[in-house]
Amino acid sequence: GNSVTQMEGPVTLSEEAFLTINCTYTATGYPSLFWYVQYPGEGLQLLLKATKADDKGSNKGFEATYRKETTSFHLEKGSVQVSDSAVYFCALGGGSARQLTFGSGTQLTVLP
Amino acid sequence: DVKVTQSSRYLVKRTGEKVFLECVQDMDHENMFWYRQDPGLGLRLIYFSYDVKMKEKGDIPEGYSVSREKKERFSLILESASTNQTSMYLCASRPEQGRGTEAFFGQGTRLTVV
């Protein structure tokens, strides 16, 4: 079946530091891959997505590249801000499943 | 702007009460989902529905039931609330499968059972 393994947190960075959150997946076929963000007290919002190998999703300075050879979809940002403090979830959709499969989430705290 | 709306942001209920959590989406999506979110456990799927009156169990259905009488509305029911059901509940919807179709989430309901 489908599964997502996500880098465990929490992650604490200083403002303007480089961010990487690792995500690897197991799936049959060619899944679509997603990153969601959850700000404190809120629901999840789509941050970016990629639907095929070598696609790069990007939004708000965040990027992730769909790497089929390493079954990975790592999230990166070159310079984080305090406002990026949130929980980040990697997810995949694929096969016959109607639901997305989520990773366990990574708590990011950015200090001024 | 697409919307998934959950009826309450915060709820406090007593042990043994029957609790209804309501979710409405305005995107004409076929699929709707209920998750619970607990620290260290991520999102766990309780139930989902792929059509009116159709439902399927997720990973943790025990102690819950659902109702989908209209396409836009999906209700989660705690038959007899217990303290271990204190959690954040998230509703989501998703169109019928297609490549790259994401799920859209409501703002969440934080339920406390005392």
Image: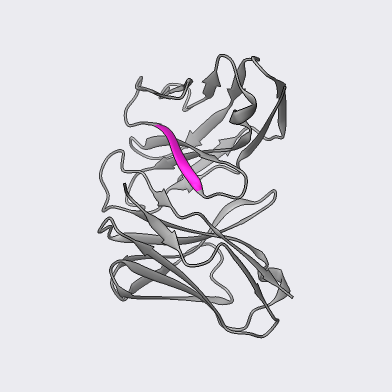
Q: Nearer the viewer, residue A81 or A24?
A: A81
Q: Which residues are magenta?
A: A44-48
Residue drawn 37% across and 56% down? B93
B85 horizontally vs B33: left or right: right
Query: Which scheme is used to colour this image of the protein?
Result: one colour
Q: Nearer the viewer, residue B15 or A41?
A: A41
* Residue A30 location, quadrant: top left
User: Looking at the picture, how far across and down is residue A86, in whole percent?
Assistant: 61, 37
User: Looking at the picture, how far across and down is residue A43, in whole percent?
Assistant: 52, 50
* Residue B85 location, quadrant: bottom right
Residue B54 lies in the magenta-colored region: no
One can see residue B37 in this view: yes
B44 horizontally vs B41: left or right: left
Question: Which secondary structure is most common in the magenta stretch?
Answer: strand
A82 horizontally vs A31: left or right: right
Residue drawn 31% across and 76% down? B53
Tally of marks: 0
User: Looking at the picture, how far across and down is residue A5, in whole percent?
Assistant: 57, 37
User: Looking at the picture, how far across and down is residue B74, in whole percent?
Assistant: 39, 69
Vertical placement of B57 versus A90: above or below? below
Q: Which quarter shows the C terminus of chain B?
A: bottom right
Vertical placement of B105 versus B23: above or below? above
One can see residue A1 in this view: no
Q: Nearer the viewer, residue B110 or A88?
A: B110
